[in-house]
Image (cartoon, rainbow, N blue to C red):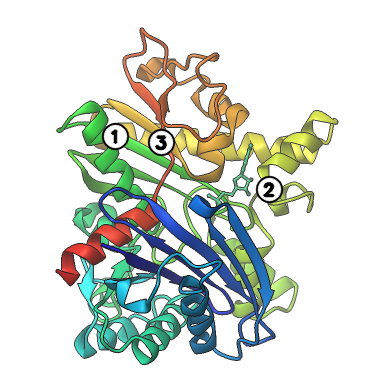
Amino acid sequence: MKILVINAGSSSLKYQLMDPDSGDVFAKGLCERIGIDGRLTHKAPAKDIKVVSEIPMPTHAEAITAVLDILVDPVNGVVSSVDEIDAVGHRVVHGGMKFAESCLIDEACLEAVRACIPLGPLHNPANLLGIEACQKILPNKPQVAVFDTAYHMTMPPKAYRYAIPDEYYEKDSLRRYGFHGTSHRYIAKRVEALEGKGLKVINCHLGNGSSLAAILDGKCQDTSMGLSPLCGVPMGTRVGDIDTTVAQYICKNYNKSMDEVMTILNKKSGVFGLSGGVSSDFRDLEAAAAQGNEKAQLALDKFAYEVKKYIGAYAAALGGLDVLVFTAGVGENGVLMRSMICEGLEFLGVKLDQEKNKLRGDERIISAADSKVKIWVIPTNEELMIAQDTAALAK
Ligand code: AMP
């Protein structure tokens, strides 16, 4: 089968055409500047092709058309006709309490995704634009929605409820949902294949956005993001967990609206804010810290400290720990950060092998031979999960 995986943002759209069984990627790329002008970057790995072209994309529909045109292009394409594409899988960020699994898109599913817009106002409208464009251009292809929140629906109420008056949960569904669920689910499956069933696992998805998940026998028990992807550990530009009074203080004393404060907490905080604006990129922070920049060093220390604290908390929540996993940009590549996080966790049975840790981007065990807890680096593959769910539901 050939599945087209779409991840639509408000002005960008990522795509991959892949085989859900082998995981082979025939082509992948990115449409940027949708609604502004339009640029397509397309790669076909097997043909060693990379093309960048300026194509007008007033809406997501033109972006999808540009993707399909290049997929069937005699030189740069990878299929002879759109008929070879069996189905389309869409990443949808917020599935609210409605979706514990992926869903074949029909009018009822679309209505439910629209109903989740108040919970995911930054992402769901953009995801819907991608779905609606594909429905218009590929009306006869099965389309599937795969939700970031779905994997976390196995959390027990004590993990997902906030200690606020219960009417806000009963009436408004305000609770912890968690994100990066498709990535956490992929890792849970890989750990089962590598280490077996029934294990207590903590997955550290550390990238520009970061979240941890406490996993028992493949199922999520707790996760660090909440109603939105703002909370948990500090991130590239997101603040992570914080006393809400800080928001009120900035509002009052700097004469800002709540929306302006949310922008500060989402876009100007995290390691970027803490480093005094050095960078949200961990490579830049490491380079600056190595040159003696104390704020960059503090940002790295804070990040490692908060991730370490979550690992301790989740080991307590799970009643032990068998496997610790690092994934996503920083988790897969951050040799120094992995070492900083694991340092001092020996009391939990976490012992890193510093030589094995010197790797970037490969699936490999990096714990010492006598470590009670297995430590793995596992590159995540959310697209493969989306393609596999799509293939299963399209059949
Ligand atoms: P992601 O959001 O998963 O794509 O991760 C992106 C982040 O990974 C970037 O912001 C970088 O900070 C981080 N990253 C990528 N390569 C490295 C590396 N070699 N060392 C440390 N961090 C890295």
Q: Position of residue 225 (x, y in %)?
A: 42, 56
Q: Which residue is mark 3?
A: 378
2 or 1: tag closer to the N-terminus: 1
Q: Secondary structure at mark 1?
A: strand
- Mark 3 vs 2: CB contact within 8 A: no
Q: Which residue is mark 2?
A: 281
Q: Quick check: is the Cβ at mark 1 less than 8 Å away from ligand 1?
A: no
Taking the image as shown, residue 40 lies to the left or right of residue 107, namely right
Q: Is residue 216 above or below residue 149?
A: above
Taking the image as shown, residue 56 lies to the left or right of residue 304, namely right
The answer for how far apart the CA atoms under marks 2 and 1 are is 27 Å
Along the viewing direction, whichever of 29 and 360 lies nearer the viewer: 29
Q: Quick check: is the Cβ at mark 2 less than 8 Å away from ligand 1?
A: yes
Quarter of the picture containing the N terminus is bottom left
Q: Position of residue 379 (x, y in %)?
A: 44, 40
Along the viewing direction, whichever of 186 and 308 lies nearer the viewer: 186
* Image mark for residue 376: none
The answer for how far apart the CA atoms under marks 1 and 3 are is 13 Å
Q: Is residue 50 above or below residue 356?
A: below
Q: Which residue is mark 1?
A: 201
Along the viewing direction, whichever of 19 and 257 lies nearer the viewer: 19
Query: Type of residue at label 2?
Result: Asp
Q: Secondary structure at mark 2?
A: loop
Q: Is residue 326 above or below residue 15?
A: above
The answer for how far apart the CA atoms under marks 3 and 2 are is 20 Å
Residue 307 visible to an observer of this rendering: yes
Along the viewing direction, whichever of 163 and 53 lies nearer the viewer: 53
* Mark 1 Cα shell of 10 Å, populated few (<14), some (14-19), many (≥20): many
